[in-house]
Image (cartoon, rainbow, N blue to C red):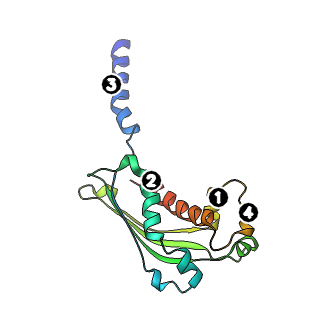
Amino acid sequence: MIRNTFAGLLLATALVLPAVAQEAPTVKSIDVSVDIAAVKNEAATKYWGQLETDLEGAILAKVQSQVADDGIDISIDISEVELSNGFQEVIGIADTRLVGAVKMTHATDNSRFDAYELTVDVNAATPLLPEGFVLSTATVETKEYYDAMINAFADGVVKRLK
C-alpha cells in the first residue's frame, strides 16, 4: 500500500513539473510605430526622433534568446511622448512620459493574445538610471535619461509576454 501511494505521488509530481517549469514565451516580431510629426513639443521631437528603432532594439535585446518562428507578434503604437527637464522632474510638475498601445498576437495560440495601454513616466525610469546620476541636472539631451525611459517601456512590454 505504501509503495502504491509513493508511486502515485511520483507520477503526480512528474505530471505537474512540466507545467511549473514553463519555458520563456517566444517572440516572432516587434514593430513600433510613432507619428513623431504629431508631437507638439519641439524638444521632444528631437529627443524622441529615433524612438521606433531604439524601442524595438531595447525589446529585442531583452528577448533575444526567445526569438522563434512560432512566437508572438508585438505591435506598439506610441500615442504620446512628452518631455520635461530634470528640474521639473524633481519638483513634481513633470510630464515626461511615453504612452503606447501594445498588442500581442499569435498565429495559432489564442491564449497568447493581449492588448493594453502602457504608460512609462520618470518614476518608472528612475531606477534604471546609472548610479550617481543626478536627475535635477538632466537636460533634454541627456542620453542616460532617454535610455532609461526606453528601457522602462521595454521592461513593461517584456514583463507582460505570454
Q: Residues within 10 Å of mark 1 (few under 14, many from 20)?
A: some
User: For numbered disc 2, what is the local secondary structure?
Assistant: helix
The reply to whether callout 3 and callout 2 are in contact (CB within 8 Å) is: no
User: For numbered disc 3, what is the local secondary structure?
Assistant: helix
User: Quadrant location of the N terminus?
Assistant: top left
Q: Which residue is mark 3?
A: 11
Of the pair 137 and 10, the residue shown nearer to us: 137
The Cα–Cα distance between marks 1 and 2, rounded to whole angstroms, is 18 Å
**Who comes first in sequence, dot 4 or dot 3?**
3
Amino acid residing under circle 4: Val
The Cα–Cα distance between marks 4 and 1, rounded to whole angstroms, is 9 Å
Q: Which mark is residue 61?
A: 2
Amino acid residing under circle 2: Ala
The reply to whether callout 1 and callout 3 are in contact (CB within 8 Å) is: no
Q: Which mark is residue 134?
A: 4
Image point (60%, 65%), residue name: 143
Q: Which residue is mark 1?
A: 129
The Cα–Cα distance between marks 4 and 3, rounded to whole angstroms, is 56 Å
